[in-house]
Amino acid sequence: MTDLATRDAYGVLTEPTTLKLQRLMPGPIERIWAYLTESELRRKWLAAGQMEMKVGASFELVWRNDELTNPPGQRPPGFGEEHRRQSRITALDPPRKLVITWGDSGEVSIELEPKGDQVLLTLIHRRLPDRTTMLMVGAGWHMHLDILVARASGQEPPPFWDGWSRLRTEYDRRLPA
């Protein structure tokens, strides 16, 4: 397994506007697929929102990051209690691949690959419009995936906002200016 599959792995730029992150999750693959596609499970690590599982289907993601962990940590200035984003499914291969639009910030592809009794999750966020967005998205996906690993492993994740703020600083240091 690559270093990218570890829980604390940082995202890497595979192209100037493309960020890739990987995490190794406890299986089976169908369980992790449910965390990606079922609103009640997805809201525990990312955002709620009902998805019709077909290519072309539109849906809304609703973030309430204060509810992801207890305690939530200190929310940075400029972030509200709730955030919404319109998305659309552009590719689908259950339970291995989900590709969605990401509002004005490109496209997100999530692929699952069985690795024995574990699952390798590969997330690729393409067409990030600028460095500021890249830093927010890098820290966001990193922290959300850490929470998913914790939830799927039956553990309590660390405070979301404290982790996001620390990671935002670290991504600023790691990603090219």
Image (spheres, rainbow, N blue to C red):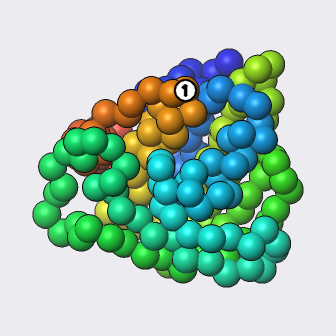
In the foreground, 34 or 77: 34
Residue at the (47%, 50%) spot, across then down: 44
Residue 172 visible in the displayed image:
no
Q: Residue 21 falls in which quadrant of the image? A: top right
| Category of crowding for the residue at label 1, using alpha-carbon neighbours closer than 10 angstroms: few (below 14), some (14–19), many (at least 20) | few
Q: Would you say 118 lies left or right of 171 here?
A: right
- Indicate whether 58 appears above or below 94: below
- Indicate whether 90 appears above or below 73: below
Q: Would you say 135 lies left or right of 98 here?
A: left
Residue 34 visible in the displayed image:
yes
| Element type at mark 1 | loop
Residue at numbered disc 1: 153
Residue at the (62%, 71%) spot, across then down: 50
Q: Would you say 135 lies left or right of 47 here?
A: left
Task: Name the spot of residue 136 as percent of width and height, x first.
Answer: 35, 57
Residue at the (51%, 64%) spot, across then down: 48
Q: Residue 57 falls in which quadrant of the image? A: bottom right
Task: Name the spot of residue 76 as percent of width and height, x first.
Answer: 17, 57
Task: Name the spot of residue 67 as percent of width and height, x first.
Answer: 33, 54
**Amino acid at circle 1:** Ser
Q: Residue 29 falls in which quadrant of the image? A: top right
* Image quarter hosting the N terminus: top right
In the foreground, 165 or 50: 50
Task: Name the spot of residue 128 as percent of width and height, x first.
Answer: 49, 65
Residue at the (27%, 41%) spot, across then down: 70
In the foreground, 107 or 118: 118
